[in-house]
Amino acid sequence: LVSDATPSYVLSQIEKASASATEFATAFNNFIADGPNSSHAEIIRTINVFASSIADVLSNTKGLTRLATDDKKADQLTNGARQSALSTVKFFRGLQSFRLDGMDPIQKTDVVINSNNEVQMNLQKLNKLADTFAPHSDKITNNKGDLGDLVDSELNKAADAISAAAARLAKLKSKPKDQYSTYKLEIHDSILDAAIAVTNAIARLIKAATVTQQEIVQAGRGSSSKTAFYKKNNRWTEGLISAAKAVASSTNTLIETADGVLSGRNSPEQLIVASNNVAASTAQLVAASRVKAGFMSKSQESLEEASKAVGAACRALVRQVQSMIKDRDQEDEGEDYAKLGAHEFKVREMEQQVEILQLENNLAAARKRLGEMRKISYLEE
């Protein structure tokens, strides 16, 4: 997941870290103001949220460096994240009881305020650096319609795409299979069953995401409207909409590819890539919700469980396809190398070494092209 972090997601993580730092500072100052009888509960809760949000910023910022156009940009981003982490460590250490001993309440409060200001300054600098990686569009902030409706619409579209995918798989399952041998029929059914399990798991995930979404908005908007909440958190909203679209798109691709594999139009390897893309897109949707979910939220917990089920279903599909690839490759290995003469054997061995070298070079070139394509795709989103 870390390597797939999107700019919008990293920006929303920075926003969460900034808010949680201030929440922690407020809780600590309230603790000081309440004197000897004050409760530690709120400090413990807010410090956990603050520390974990900074940890998320660090791991996801590292993932974002893959989109850097040069080493200098990647280093600036990494250093920005490092400074945010160091100022957080300094904040925590500065509040250890032995350091605050002998200070009056106003001095202690000043330590908290100054430390929080330093964290906020570093997070703002990191925000500016991460923002250069994000596509610059005003689609969310300038949207004239109801943003709440837009988010709901994208989640509904994702749900509709899953329903259509499930219906298509059911249709494929009921097709006449007279042309298949017993073995090929078994392969056909196992892939379809695995794909159906994936779509069923995604359908449950979309339902859980919708419930979580409603809970987040209800808790976060206060007296303001749903649209105002989404506009205020526009980076997070962009990430959420992008994730919902990715789930719908990747599911459609998965079903198209599964159909193609069964009819011979697509290779099994393409189905593995499609399955991995489904797992990545659903993880992105869960991560987007996680940024704003309440502490110990039951609906977020249900969403995380649904995400695990999607991951398990995708892995099961990949295992079926890998088994199919293994059988295909074994069919191709019909030659008995023990019957070759010494010279011919040596020639064949060299040919294999050359082929491996060519494949490795092609693989390196393909990875480089994919990296360049991903940089452009994020800028065009």
Image (cartoon, helix red, strand yellow):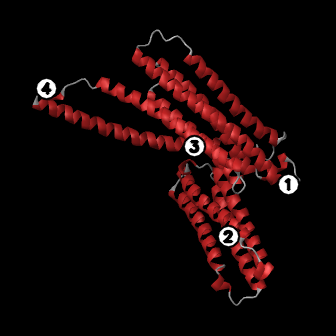
Q: Residue furthest bottom?
A: 102
- The residue wearing badge 3 is 308
Disc 2, SS: helix
Left or right of residue 277, residue 26 in this image: right
- The residue wearing badge 2 is 119
User: Which is nearer the N-term, disc 4 or disc 1?
Assistant: 1
- Depth-wise, is mark 4 or mark 1 nearer the camera? 1
- Depth-wise, is mark 2 or mark 3 nearer the camera? 3
Callout 4–callout 1 Cβ contact below 8 Å: no
* Separation of marks 3 and 4 at Cα, in angstroms: 50 Å
In the rendered structure, find residue 5 and report the number of the disc placed on it. none
User: Which is nearer the N-term, disc 1 or disc 2?
Assistant: 2
Identify which amino acid the numbered label 4 is placed on. Answer: Lys
* Separation of marks 4 and 1 at Cα, in angstroms: 80 Å
In the rendered structure, find residue 222 and report the number of the disc placed on it. 1
Disc 1, SS: loop
Q: Residue at x 73, y 40 (%)?
A: 210
User: Which is nearer the N-term, disc 2 or disc 3?
Assistant: 2
User: Which is nearer the N-term, disc 3 or disc 4?
Assistant: 3
Identify which amino acid the numbered label 2 is placed on. Answer: Val
Disc 4, SS: helix
Identify which amino acid the numbered label 1 is placed on. Answer: Gly
Q: Do we see residue 140 in this rendering? A: no
Q: Do we see residue 27 in this rendering? A: yes
Left or right of residue 69, residue 137 in this image: right
